Image: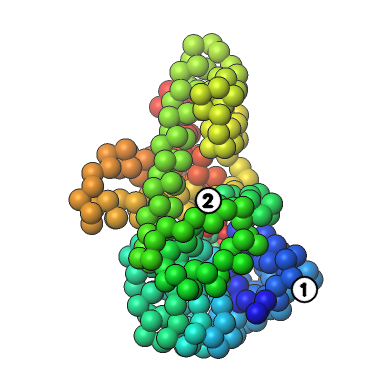
Amino acid sequence: MKEVGFIGLGSMGVPMVQNLLKEGFRVKVYNRTPEKASGLVEAGAQQVYHPSEAAAAGGIVITMVSNDQALQEVTHAFADQLGAGGVHLSMSTVSPETSRQLALYHQERGSEYVASPVFGRPEAAAAQKLFILSSGPREAKERVQPLQEALGQRVFDISEEPGGANVIKLGGNFMIMAAMEAMAEAFNLAEKSGIDRNLAAEVYASTLFNCTVYQGYGKMIAGKAFEPAGFQLGLGLKDCNLVLQEANSLQTPMPLASLLHDRLLASAAKGRAQQDWSALARIALEEAGLE
Ligand code: NAP
């Protein structure tokens, strides 16, 4: 059945729905701020005005909303309508614990929950290049796979346990933040030695650090260009909190995550929550007297 509901038309949700339409899916879209659906309606999506209207009984609903609280709110609003035989494909970055709780919430209604967070920014979403993680019951994962394949370049089956994909996603975001802080400090060192920081970034990104994170964020941090935001710093702070929460519950010290949390918190306190999360580099810039 090529019909699906989609909730959350933010920076990620809009290009994802565009790709589902392109791949021939019929998509019912819901967004809290209804105006954001207008472009998608022109492209063929059907707009609905309550989360429950995005769910067909026994069908599939995809969610891509900001955080745990938003996900819980929308899920509680559509789960009854989805009902027996339905699957919730949950693609937001949320805590493993939220996934575990929502899996139970669906189970009580005869529906199933697949946690499926993604790696890749809005540009990657638009290009169908997301890397997609998947955890949940085997049959539900198989059922949503055609949708995941329409949205990304590769799907990784992580676990049957619902929180597994979220653990891997949070670990990855932690590693990106650590790389951004390391680049900020190394580029500052180059600049204060009188060397062009853009040249430093180019050397690293084309030799030992020849990969997407160092290439993409390296350019932004070397060029001190933190807007427009592909991924908002406020959302990065949310993720860092989730990393520390999980680390705490598993008694796994992550001193580097604690440092990054303080960097992000200070950035938010300075009014930078809407900037790209690479703006965490501005703290190191300020400390080095370079901003
Ligand atoms: P975004 O542009 O801020 O969009 C957030 C979406 O969530 C909007 O549709 C927003 O509705 C909706 N929302 C927020 N609170 C809500 C609530 N209480 N009830 C209903 N809807 C609510 O965020 P995004 O960048 O698309 O990110 C979405 C998710 O993907 C996040 O979990 C993020 O961590 C993850 N992610 C993002 C990226 C990235 O590079 N951007 C990459 C990978 C993963 P309104 O329009 O009404 O505000």
Which of the pair 287/81 is nearer the observer?
81
Q: Is residue 187 above or below residue 147?
A: above
The residue under label 1 is 44
Q: Quadrant of residue 147?
A: bottom right
Ligand 1: quadrant of the figure: bottom right
Looking at the rendered structure, which numbered label has been put on residue 177? none
The residue under label 2 is 119
Q: Is residue 254 above or below residue 285?
A: below
Horizontal arrangement in the rendering, residue 100 relative to residue 115 (left or right)? left
Q: Position of residue 63 (x, y in %)?
A: 53, 70
Q: Residue at x 59, y 24 (%)?
A: 206
Q: CA distance from mark 2 to mark 1?
A: 27 Å
Q: Residue at x 62, y 76 (%)?
A: 4
| Ligand 1 contact, mark 2 (Cβ < 8 Å) | yes
Q: Residues within 10 Å of mark 1 (few under 14, many from 20)?
A: some
| Residue 219 shows in this picture | yes
First-in-chain label (2 vs 1): 1
